[in-house]
Image: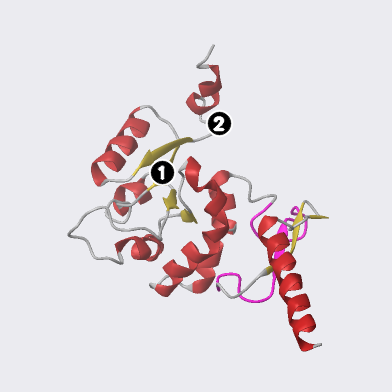
């Protein structure tokens, strides 16, 4: 019974997500899925730019992980991870961008726009970089009918920012999930407000 959840994968109703970084791992994963007639989505994909041909041939999208990280090999250029999305885009391989898949990185997913921004700084068109964390992610996950872009008929799940969402100087002012405004308060903001008020009072008292 523990394998029952795998039935939709075997029936090709949903894809199987395989985490692979190196070329040999990617090739083995593609071969295994092809042999077993399974739909595959590649996660990680550090070497996906090297294996773009088999990925494109088998129509396998890439959930590219953590552009803001060091290369896997000491002899690789320091900008290797930053340039992978551009290379995949140039070859016509479907991809989206995410942060780290480590459980310890969950609190840091707020930095996702800056992962995309770095890929834009290293050659990926800026509109493509934005799509890589919005529309393309929704398409790969099969939910683009509901989210991923601002279109009539989709869920009103969106953010309003003070500027370019890929710029670190921009702030999220308002967020909606399914049309309902979401409370953006957190401990960081409460502490900021607390100490701004504290030092404002100290300044006022010192001037009296």
Q: Is residue 22 visible?
A: yes
State the residue at coordinates (31%, 47%).
54
Q: Give the structural element (helix, strand or loop) at label 2.
A: loop
Q: Which residue is mark 1?
A: 42
State the residue at coordinates (38%, 60%).
88
As drawn, the label of residue 13 is 2
Q: Are marks 1 and 2 in contact (CB under 8 Å)?
A: no
**What secondary structure is the stretch in magenta mostly built from?**
loop
Residue 70 screen position, x and y as percent? 32, 58
Q: Is residue 208 magenta?
A: no
From this view, report whether residue 119 is shown above or below residue 30.
below
In this picture, which residue range is highlighted in magenta? 147-167
Q: Is residue 133 visible?
A: no
Mark 2 neighbour class, 10 Å CA radius: few under 14, some 14 to 19, many 20 or more: few
From this view, report whether residue 3 is shown above or below residue 151.
above
Q: Where is residue 187, by image quadrant?
A: bottom right
Of 101 and 157, nearer the camera is 101
Q: Check the picture and name the quadrant holding the C terminus.
A: bottom right
Q: Is residue 183 left or right of residue 117?
A: right
Q: Nearer the viewer, mark 1 or mark 2?
A: 1
């Amino acid at each position: 019974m523990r394998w029952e959840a795998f039935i939709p994968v075997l029936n090709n109703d949903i894809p199987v997500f395989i985490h692979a970084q190196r070329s040999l791992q990617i090739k083995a994963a593609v071969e295994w899925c092809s042999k077993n007639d399974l739909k595959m989505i590649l996660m990680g994909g550090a070497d996906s730019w090297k294996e773009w041909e088999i990925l494109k041939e088998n129509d396998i999208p890439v959930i590219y992980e953590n552009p803001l990280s060091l290369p896997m090999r000491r002899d690789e250029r320091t900008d290797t991870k930053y340039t992978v999305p551009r290379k995949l885009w140039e070859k016509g391989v479907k991809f989206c961008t995410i942060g780290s898949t480590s459980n310890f990185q969950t609190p840091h997913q707020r930095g996702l726009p800056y992962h995309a921004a770095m890929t834009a700084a290293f050659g990926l068109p800026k509109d493509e970089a934005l799509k890589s964390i919005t529309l393309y992610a929704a398409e790969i996950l099969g939910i683009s009918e509901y989210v991923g872009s601002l279109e009539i008929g989709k869920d009103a799940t969106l953010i309003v920012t003070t500027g370019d969402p890929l710029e670190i100087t921009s702030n999220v002012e308002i967020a909606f999930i399914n049309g309902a405004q979401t409370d953006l308060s957190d401990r960081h903001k409460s502490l900021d407000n607390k100490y701004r008020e504290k030092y404002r009072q100290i300044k006022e008292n010192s001037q009296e």
